[in-house]
Amino acid sequence: MARWVLHVDLDQFLAAVEVLRRPELRGRPVVVGGDGDPTKRGVVSTASYEARAYGVHSGLPLRMAARRCPDAVFLPVDRELYEAVSDEVMAALRSLGAVVEVLGWDEAFLAVDGDPEAVAEEIRARVHAATGLDCTVGIGENKLQAKIATGLGKPAGVFRLTGDTWFAVLGDRPTDALWGIGAKTAKRLRELGITTVSELAAADPGALAERFGPATGPWLVRLARGLGGSAVSDAPHVPRSRGRETTFQQDLDDWTRVRREVSRLARRVADDVADEHGDVARVVVKVRYAPFTTRTHGSTLDAPTSVPERIEEAALAALARFAGRRPVRLLGVRAEFARPRPRPVTGA
Ligand SMILES: [Mg+2]
């Protein structure tokens, strides 16, 4: 197996692509999101570094972004363009002859041997030559280390994070610095008196198993020790779920309509599922109440299926679990596939 895992992530991808086609925007705060109108509903997809300096970040409502940074240039999401540029990026990565595992539009893992810094600089040069875009490359002994290294190397840098430097770099950081630990898990860990990566690494896996479950508990400790992650694989990407969501320009306060919209979204998801030839094990419904509180509930199917009626029923069963009947600004339905493709696990 290759000695090194490299994680490549384009810097401010959507904003950078927009600046490429409109060079007069270079150096200005640029916000890409929704249909580019900050008086309408929608959220930020990507903000340029200039806009981030004003506290604008992905997921922020566009209106809030306009308030924080009134001088920002707002642009609509141009999915087709980003997909085309993404294809060029991935082609540049594949031109190195390494195994490339695509993670998203602007992210990939590579398995490489030799001098990893030299390969990383070669990657940055080839991506820039092909697209004019900057990227950051994280170097690690596994995917987890490489992915976190990228965050530390941003922007336009190369950063190496290995077992030898893991605790010196991350030991005192909060647990949600780890890839896979979000705000919710970090909060539950804090309730157990575990705040930092070092504290989590020293925690008893058995005790965490009791609190988080037999698989997740010990996995959290392994994460904190910088271990694990599967091997880099160029097997075609198999999605684990398909989802659709809609933001309403006017809140829905009639829950009969909310039900109808959830049915409609579930049918569209069922169409997507049919395209993937997958069977659905669970359906999750997301409700964002006005002004901006988001809740999710799921419903597990009796048996995995792709039958649209069953998927719709499961979505409505999940919706029935929402206690609040307050006005709704966004609805989402996501179908999770049964049995994600197993990936080989490395010993590292
Ligand atoms: Mg990126």
Image: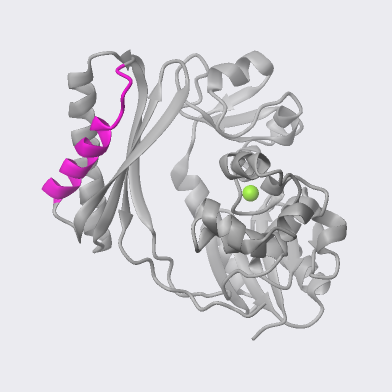
| Residue located 61% across and 17% down the image | 66
Q: Position of residue 158 (x, y in %)?
A: 81, 60
Q: Is residue 215 above or below residue 74?
A: below
As for residue 224 lying within the magenta part, the answer is no
Q: On the image, which quarter does residue 54 sit in?
A: top right
| Residue located 70% across and 27% down the image | 29
As for residue 309 lying within the magenta part, the answer is yes
Q: Is residue 179 left or right of residue 289?
A: right
Between 143 and 182, the residue placed more toward the observer is: 182
Between 115 and 262, the residue placed more toward the observer is: 262
Q: Is residue 255 left or right of residue 163?
A: left
Image quarter in which the N terminus is found: bottom right
Residue 28 can be seen in this image: no
Image quarter in which the C terminus is found: bottom right
> Does the magenta stretch mainly form a helix, a strand or a loop?
helix
Q: Position of residue 249 (x, y in %)?
A: 36, 17
The magenta stretch spans which residues? 308-325
Q: Is residue 279 above or below residue 255?
A: below
